[in-house]
Image: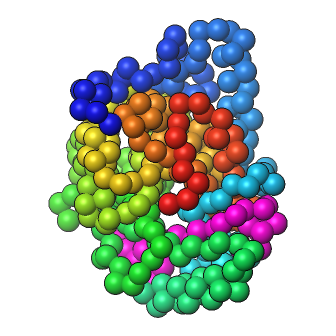
């Protein structure tokens, strides 16, 4: 985390000996020069691409027996599909040492996907009761995914995940992860179609997450790339994009936060690799950041989706719990 590292351009964190590719990864991705390795990576990506949304044909279950825990877990109290008890039972079945629940904090701009104030109280009661019931079998943590625009919670939580799901401009919200069309329409209306101006505002909020929420975990650092699998939404190696992301990263590295390796969009068929993207992920690691594995679970069958694969990255420091 030394000051000299902060002066490097994020572009240097592209894999050594890599080249840009028009492959399945999109035009702004990198593949190794070695044809055999590149083919292997491409085959992995094609397999990952078939991992669809839980409500679409072909959805896959998470792995089992890996002693991995997940602390980004949604329930029926927000936009998840399962009760806290059902998720706790799945965590036991998979052999998880711990399970952290992290319902979406109430957001007036998008009330359909978050917990209501009344639902938040019920969520807290149920999770705290399960903690007592499962004591000695499963370490249950009570967390909250704290949206940038939500009021700060008055109650105590074991940890907060700080996330940016929308950008407010001129009194209107551009929701980052609802749909590609909605995102583009918002950028056109409020930014004159300048996707990089939008990215600059997005990362400005991300950089402010710890100051605003005192979160322990930074959620899906580059969520705005959810619909950029083909590289046509924006160029993730563009100087303006990398500068904005780098400034956010430098601010967060001064705070006691963990960065998610988040496989949620993979489980739901939007991405073939986790958040953050490879260039940003290498930058976080190089600059001294620490990661935590996260499935951003919305369905019990995907509680540990893709997490075991992420343990084998030699350049990363991964904490087991927040």
Residue 227 visible to an observer of this rendering? no
In the rendered view, tell whether residue 185 sits above or below residue 139. Answer: above
Instruction: Look at the image and say whether residue 130 sits in the magenta stretch.
Output: no
* Residue with the most extreme front position: 136
Q: Which span of residues is magenta-colored?
A: 88-116
Residue lying at 34% horizontally and 84% vertically, measured from the top left:
154
Residue lying at 69% horizontally and 55% vertically, measured from the top left:
68
Which x, y percent locates residue 275?
51, 44
Which x, y percent locates residue 274?
56, 42
Describe residue 250's horizontal placement relative to residue 215 as left or right: left
In the rendered view, tell whether residue 33 sits above or below residue 296. Answer: above
Which x, y percent locates residue 162?
39, 61
Describe residue 24's horizontal placement relative to residue 138 as left or right: left
Picture quadrant where residue 147 is located: bottom left
Taking depth in this image into account, of 206 and 185 the one nearest to the observer is 206
Residue 285 visible to an observer of this rendering? yes
Taking depth in this image into account, of 208 and 80 the one nearest to the observer is 208
Which x, y percent locates residue 321?
55, 59
């Amino acid at each position: 985390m030394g000051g000299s590292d902060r002066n490097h351009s994020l572009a240097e964190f592209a894999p050594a000996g890599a080249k840009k590719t028009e492959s399945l990864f999109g035009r702004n991705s990198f593949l190794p020069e070695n044809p055999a390795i590149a083919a292997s990576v491409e085959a992995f990506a094609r397999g990952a691409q078939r991992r669809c949304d839980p409500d679409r044909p072909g959805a896959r279950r998470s792995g089992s027996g890996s002693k991995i825990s997940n602390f980004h877990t949604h329930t029926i109290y927000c936009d998840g599909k399962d009760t806290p008890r059902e998720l706790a039972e799945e965590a036991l079945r998979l052999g998880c040492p711990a399970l952290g629940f992290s319902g979406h904090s109430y957001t007036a701009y998008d009330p359909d996907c978050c917990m209501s104030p009344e639902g938040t109280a019920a969520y807290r009661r149920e999770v705290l009761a399960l903690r007592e019931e499962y004591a000695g079998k499963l370490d249950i943590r009570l967390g909250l995914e704290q949206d940038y625009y939500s009021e700060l919670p008055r109650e105590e939580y074991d940890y907060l995940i700080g996330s940016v799901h929308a950008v407010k401009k001129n009194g209107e919200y551009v929701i980052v992860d609802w749909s590609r069309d909605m995102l583009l329409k918002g950028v056109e209306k409020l930014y004159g179609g300048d996707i990089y101006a939008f990215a600059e505002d997005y990362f400005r909020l991300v950089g402010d997450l710890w100051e605003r929420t005192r979160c322990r975990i930074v959620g899906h650092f580059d969520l705005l790339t959810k619909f950029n699998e083909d590289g046509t939404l924006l160029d993730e190696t563009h100087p303006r994009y990398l500068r904005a992301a780098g400034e956010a990263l430098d601010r967060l590295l001064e705070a006691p936060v963990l960065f998610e390796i988040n496989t949620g969009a993979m489980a739901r068929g939007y991405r073939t690799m986790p958040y953050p993207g490879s260039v940003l992920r290498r930058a976080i690691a190089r600059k001294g950041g620490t990661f935590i594995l996260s499935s951003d679970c919305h369905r019990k069958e995907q509680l540990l989706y893709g997490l075991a694969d992420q343990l084998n990255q030699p350049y990363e420091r991964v904490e087991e719990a927040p």
